[in-house]
Amino acid sequence: MYALELKNIAQRLMADDKGLLAMDESLGTCNKRFKALGIPETEEFRRKYRELIVTTPHLEECISGAILFEETLYQKTESGISFLEILEHKGIIAGIKVDQGTVDLPAFPGEKVTEGLDGMRERLSAYYKLGLRFAKFRAVITIGEGIPTRTCIKANAFTLARYAALRQEAGIVPVVEPEVLMDGDHSLRQCGAVTRDVLHTVFNELYEQRVALEGMILKPNMVLPGLSCPDQSDTEEIASETISSFLKVVPAAVGGIAFLSGGQAYQLASERLNMMQLRFGSLMPWSLTFSFSRAIQQPALEIWKGEDKNKDAAQKMLYHRAACNSAARRAEYNA
Ligand code: 13P
């Protein structure tokens, strides 16, 4: 029923060298990042921080969509304007994180599955009425001794696809996020093999569950060596392993690909996206952009530190990182 609308929204999210801003940290994650910088872990400080983000001047030049966390949907600026209204005014499409985090996969030590299916149909219909037009659901895959197992990959792929189908039914573009984590000492090649396996399984499930690929966005990890792998690979190898993996397993029909940053240093995330565009831009059948949280926000958060006097400088940094990633999308990033 929403096929055309879904496709149009996906195209708008991927248009004009822009990307997505993930500002959907859960309470736990947001508080953890605040704590590390001595920022009070309260609802008011989370509100202030998110006000800083959505009111950043000219953000809309580089950001097409913002992924929000439930708490943020109903928050307002100091002067009483709702964040959703501000985003709409800027022409930034509002989206939401709909998963409820990960839990241990029973009988599979070290592996996780994502929760959040209960009551989803009703929640999605309420989100649509609020004006939200896309939603993210994240699953995580860990590489380690004997993992990931087939069972874990299949369980997560099934859940990702089931949610994607529900979102499309509600007129909401699914952002499908199967994240292969960077933790561990695995090599670039191992990450490539696991990422291909995961994506292959996910697209099989999406097909089985009749998800329209044109009306969805894939939010994958870049193919990277584990954080403690002695060989950290150069930008060119990473770009090549990532794009050659996607060319094998991501159908051309997909509405777009928008990377998570996954804890990479923010300059590296931009450099790697830039290299993919520079070397492989003409080979790619899909548009490729960013959907970063830490790689856009972290330096701004470190400047802000919870203090009003730092707000302008933090906003300038936030805009700067967003603009850097938009430049990377055009293969024009200059570190
Ligand atoms: P990172 O870019 O920090 O990996 O975050 C992506 C994301 O989806 C956050 O919710």
Image (cartoon, grey):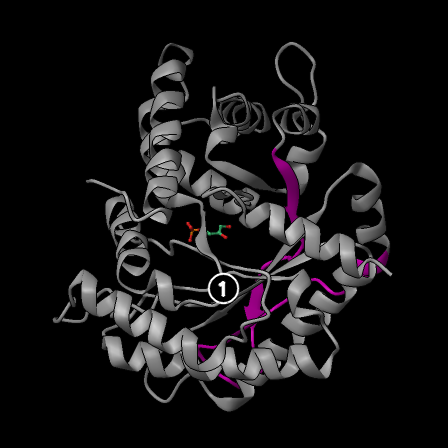
Q: Is residue 38 visible?
A: no
Residue 215 counted in the magenta span: no
Q: Is mark 1 within 8 Å of ligand 1?
A: no
Is residue 191 something one can see in this rendering?
yes
Residue at 52% across, 46% down: 28
Q: Quadrant of the N terminus?
A: bottom right
Say which element carries label 1: loop
Residue 268 against residue 103 in the figure, above or below: above
In the image: residue 287, left or right of residue 302: right
Name the residue at the left extreme.
230
Q: Quadrant of residue 161?
A: bottom right
Is 107 inside the magenta-drawn segment? yes
Q: Residue at x 46, y 64 (%)?
A: 220
Q: Quadrant of the C terminus?
A: top left
Query: What residue is drawn where x is 65% and y is 46%?
Result: 96
> Would you say 90 lies left or right of 21 here?
right
Dot 1, how many residues are within 10 Å of its Cα: few (below 14), some (14-19), or many (20+)?
Answer: some
Q: Is residue 205 above or below residue 334?
A: below
Q: Amino acid at mark 1?
A: Trp
The residue range painted magenta reads 92-121
Q: Name the residue carrying label 1.
A: 286
Q: Quadrant of residue 75?
A: top right
Q: Residue 284's spot in the image, x, y percent?
A: 42, 67
Residue 281: give x, y in percent of width and height: 35, 60
Q: Is residue 46 above or below residue 4?
A: above
Q: Residue 226 location in percent, x, y?
A: 26, 69
